[in-house]
Image: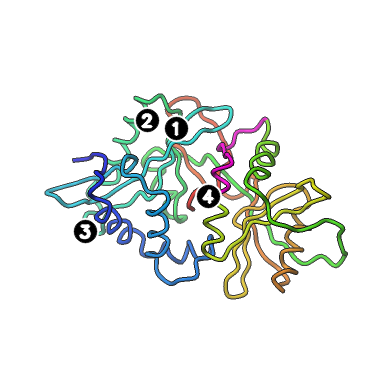
Amino acid sequence: MIRFASSGEKNGVLKVHNVCFPSEAKALLRLFNICFPGEEDFAEYFFKYWYSFENTLVDEENGVIRGLAMMYPYYIEGVGEVTYLYSVGTSPEFRGRGVCKGILEYSHKIDLEKGRKASILIPGGKDLFDFYKKLGYEVSSCIDEREFTVLSENTSFKLKECTPKELEAFYKSHFKGRKAVRRNEKYFYDQIKLFNSFGGECLGLYDSDKLLSYGFYSCENGVLKFDEILGENCDVLASEVLKKNGLSRCKGRTDGSSVPIGMAYYYGKKFDFYMNLMFN
């Protein structure tokens, strides 16, 4: 039976989440600079601030939760409402029985009833792109992955922390006329809080009071990575952050078209769009 989770099943769903993603802790350490070994720390943080049983589908058999998927409503500029599926997983002993397929099909039915344009998700690994492709999903969102080094020349631009309000305005302007997942001030507040909670940071490059570019980055064991870096003069921003951390090179994700990151199950007209920083 597939249904939405009840308020009394939070611990049960959390247990399934931990079983389904034994390797997610390492990915989250790389992406969000989580400083603790094991996935439970992020899961605890996630369930404390973002978990909602009203948005969580579970597959239950004889009182046992076999799998789950969290359905979060998002809006894509120029498209309309979509559902972002997060933490889609099946307990190991029930894999190969169509549990995941059943949950996805159930979520698609709900989406159609609500008039949503697509179901979107970010696969947790390259092999999962093939898995979701078999279930009707298509690559719909891409990024570029760049390498940055310290620049020799000095700059008059300033490096400082960004406010959620500044980030909202910058993001909206950066993607004006393009299809991208909508972000508001609260979204950026939550992202800054998440990165700061696990040792990461969001910094912007400013020309006087004008924000030129921003980057959410993490740094662990001498390896710095921008989970997202957008705007003009990204090379300068990355260089200044590298200097701040005493490093010489790093990698970063920015908007582009070379590396698939997201997939969509369309309910009508197909579209490409930008997505990132969605618990991935």
Q: Nearer the viewer, residue 55 or 126?
A: 55
Q: Residue furthest left?
A: 62
- C-alpha distance separating marks 3 and 2: 29 Å
Which residue does the image show at 62% across and 56% down from the upper left?
A: 216
- Neighbor class of circle 1 (other Cα within 10 Å; few <14, some 14-19, many 20+) is many
Q: Which residue is mark 3?
A: 93
Residue that carries the numbered disc 1 in the rendered image: 118
User: Rounded to the nearest whole Å, what is the CA distance between mark 4 and mark 2?
Assistant: 26 Å
Q: Please name the residue that numbered disc 2 is placed on.
A: 111
User: What kind of residue is marked 3?
Assistant: Glu
Rendered location of residue 191, percent (x, y): 55, 51
Task: Identify residue for label 4.
Answer: 190
Q: CA distance from mark 4 to mark 1?
A: 24 Å
- Pointer 3 with pointer 4, Cβ within 8 A: no
Do the CB atoms of the residues marked 1 and 2 lie less than 8 Å apart? Answer: yes
**Which range is magenta?**
177-189
Q: Specify whether 56 is left or right of 278.
A: left
Q: Mark 3 or mark 2, which has the lower sequence index?
A: 3
